[in-house]
């Protein structure tokens, strides 16, 4: 059974600098700028997509740099339908943070059924394969064991961005 929802709240978490804001700008505005600073200037960006032949309005929530202090307000988490966890394939520490961001989400958002809540992991900056610090085979294996869908993507070169966000949206729709 799928939810009869026309709006989905998508939140994006991960260490500062992994490329969350760039991913959202790529997906929503089809652009990339090397010089973005912390915020998108609003609580969320909107984008209409068609999923399972239905028009869905995505509300995409970015942090405004507060992730450095792990202190995102309650409104950020409230009513989230899916959580995208982002790391940078050139930064091992950002990969190791994924699990604590997932825990943070569960404790702050308090989804009714944490075991079933949809998460999606994006390994960003796959254009920088020559600077890779996170082994690709190992990360896919890790994700498989944890039952987390993982997609390596690049906001800069527009690699698998649509795929990643649409997959995350589908997971949200399929829940329940
Ligand atoms: P945030 O703190 O997670 O929101 O990260 P930003 O979106 O502000 O990006 C941090 C830095 O990473 C910026 O200098 C971006 O230009 C760079 N960046 C973001 N995405 C990519 C990518 O796909 N490839 C490369 N090479 N750099 C990226
Ligand atoms: Mg940002």
Image (cartoon, grey):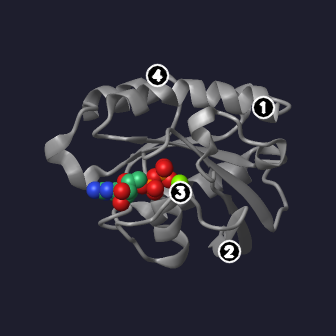
| Dot placed on the residue nearer the N-terminal end, 3 or 1 | 3
Residue contact at pointers 3 and 1, CB within 8 angstroms: no
Residue contact at pointers 2 and 4, CB within 8 angstroms: no
Q: Name the residue carrying label 3.
A: 38
Q: Name the residue carrying label 2.
A: 53
| Dot placed on the residue nearer the N-terminal end, 4 or 3 | 3
- Dot 4 lies on which element? helix
Residue contact at pointers 2 and 3, CB within 8 angstroms: no
Q: Is mark 4 within 8 Å of ligand 1?
A: no
| Dot placed on the residue nearer the N-terminal end, 2 or 3 | 3
The residue lying toward the viewer, choosing from 11 and 173, is 11
**x%, y% of residue 124?**
38, 49
* Side of 174 where 97 appears, left or right: left
Q: CA distance from mark 1 to mark 2?
A: 33 Å
- Dot 3 lies on which element? loop
| Dot placed on the residue nearer the N-terminal end, 2 or 4 | 2
Looking at the image, which residue is at 81% across and 68% down?
Answer: 6
Q: Residues within 10 Å of mark 1 (few under 14, many from 20)?
A: some
Q: Quadrant of the C terminus?
A: top right
**x%, y% of residue 135?**
25, 30
Q: Name the residue carrying label 1.
A: 108
Q: Name the residue carrying label 4.
A: 145
The residue lying toward the viewer, choosing from 85 and 143, is 85
Q: Is mark 3 within 8 Å of ligand 2?
A: yes
- Dot 2 lies on which element? loop
């Amino acid at each position: 059974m799928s939810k009869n929802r026309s709006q989905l709240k998508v939140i994006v978490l991960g260490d500062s600098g992994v490329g969350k804001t760039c991913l959202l700008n790529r997906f929503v505005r089809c652009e990339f700028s090397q010089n973005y600073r912390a915020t998108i200037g609003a609580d969320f960006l909107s984008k209409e997509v068609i999923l399972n032949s239905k028009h869905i309005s995505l509300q995409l929530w970015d942090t405004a740099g507060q992730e450095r202090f792990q202190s995102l307000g309650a409104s950020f988490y409230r009513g989230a339908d899916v959580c995208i966890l982002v790391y940078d394939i050139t930064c091992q520490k950002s990969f190791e943070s994924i699990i604590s961001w997932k825990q943070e989400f569960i404790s702050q958002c308090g989804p009714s059924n944490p075991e079933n809540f949809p998460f999606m992991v994006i390994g960003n900056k796959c254009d920088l394969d020559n600077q890779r610090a996170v082994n690709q085979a190992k990360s896919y294996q890790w994700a498989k064991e944890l039952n987390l869908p993982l997609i390596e993507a690049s906001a800069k070169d527009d690699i698998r961005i649509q795929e990643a966000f649409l997959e995350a949206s589908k997971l949200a729709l399929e829940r329940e």
